[in-house]
Amino acid sequence: MDSVARRASSAGTAPWCPAAEPDDLHHRGIFIVDIEDSDSRPYSIKALHRTQVRQIVTSSIADVGITPEQYDPPTDTGDGVRVLFAPEVPKNRLVGPLMSALTERLNSYNAAAPEGAHMRLRAVLSAGELRRDEYDYFGTPLNEAYWLLDTDELRDRLRKTTAPMALMITRDLYDGVVRHGYPQIDPDTFESCVVTHKKRDLHVWLWCP
């Protein structure tokens, strides 16, 4: 059952939609982060980073008033974390306040981190309709998000900055959210970019704090 339906049921009222069927689509905000140069770190630092990145991401989510019922349990990706947000979470809150909170917590961690344990993140934020089976969510928007996370364009953007993270967002999020200039979102700080995926050109946008 989706988070909206779970909360409605717990409140004693009817959920806004019927119980999910196997073929149903689930709209999700998709957020994935990956730790820069993780393969080059010793296992002791990897272990520290794995704990810290989950804590930083989930604490940042809480900082902006998004509750655990509004996102699926974070998924470990090896060198990072994936979070899927329920459709009622406003996308402007993900692009603006969440990225600000994440930047602040990354800066705080790095200021106190031991020598050699500083952490920077590549991040992708998108949204789309996904299917779900007994194992996990799946679908084209999720596949594309993972692919964008590994693009040379995003890696190069992080490499060229001293910021603690580099974010790539999809065109739909830029057109629907960023260009309207919601609080904590400055459209002028986003850089347009075109990447090619399976012979398709994807228009995306890059941002660093």
Image (tube, helix red, strand yellow):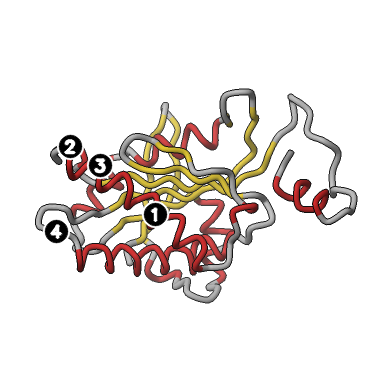
Rate crowding at label 1 as few (under 14), some (14 to 19) or many (20 or more) other CA atoms within 10 Å.
few
Q: Residue at x 19, y 52 (%)?
A: 159
- Whichever of labels 4 and 3 marks the residue nearer the N terminus, that label is 3
Disc 2 marks which residue?
A: 43
Does the residue at mark 4 contact the one at mark 1 (Cβ under 8 Å)?
no
Q: Measured from the top left, where is residue 39 in percent x and y?
A: 19, 36
Quadrant of the rendered image containing residue 102: bottom left
- Whichever of labels 3 and 1 marks the residue nearer the N terminus, that label is 3
User: Left or right: where does residue 22 sit relative to residue 147?
Assistant: right
In the rendered image of this protein, does residue 127 appear above or below residue 196? below
Quadrant of the rendered image containing residue 199: top left
Rate crowding at label 3 as few (under 14), some (14 to 19) or many (20 or more) other CA atoms within 10 Å.
few
Q: Measured from the top left, where is residue 100 in percent x and y?
A: 41, 69
Disc 4 marks which residue?
A: 114
Residue reaching furthest left? 115
- Whichever of labels 4 and 1 marks the residue nearer the N terminus, that label is 1
Circle number at residue 55? 1
Work out which quarter of the rendered image holds the C terminus and state it.
bottom left
Rate crowding at label 4 as few (under 14), some (14 to 19) or many (20 or more) other CA atoms within 10 Å.
few
Circle number at residue 47? 3
Does the residue at mark 2 contact the one at mark 1 (Cβ under 8 Å)?
no
Q: Which amino acid type is marked by label 4?
A: Pro
Rate crowding at label 2 as few (under 14), some (14 to 19) or many (20 or more) other CA atoms within 10 Å.
few
Q: Residue at x 28, y 68 (%)?
A: 108
Does the residue at mark 3 contact the one at mark 2 (Cβ under 8 Å)?
yes
- Could you say whether the residue bearing mark 4 is in a helix, strand or loop? loop
Q: Nearer the viewer, residue 171 or 74?
A: 74
Q: Which amino acid type is marked by label 2?
A: Tyr
Q: Residue at x 60, y 42 (%)?
A: 128
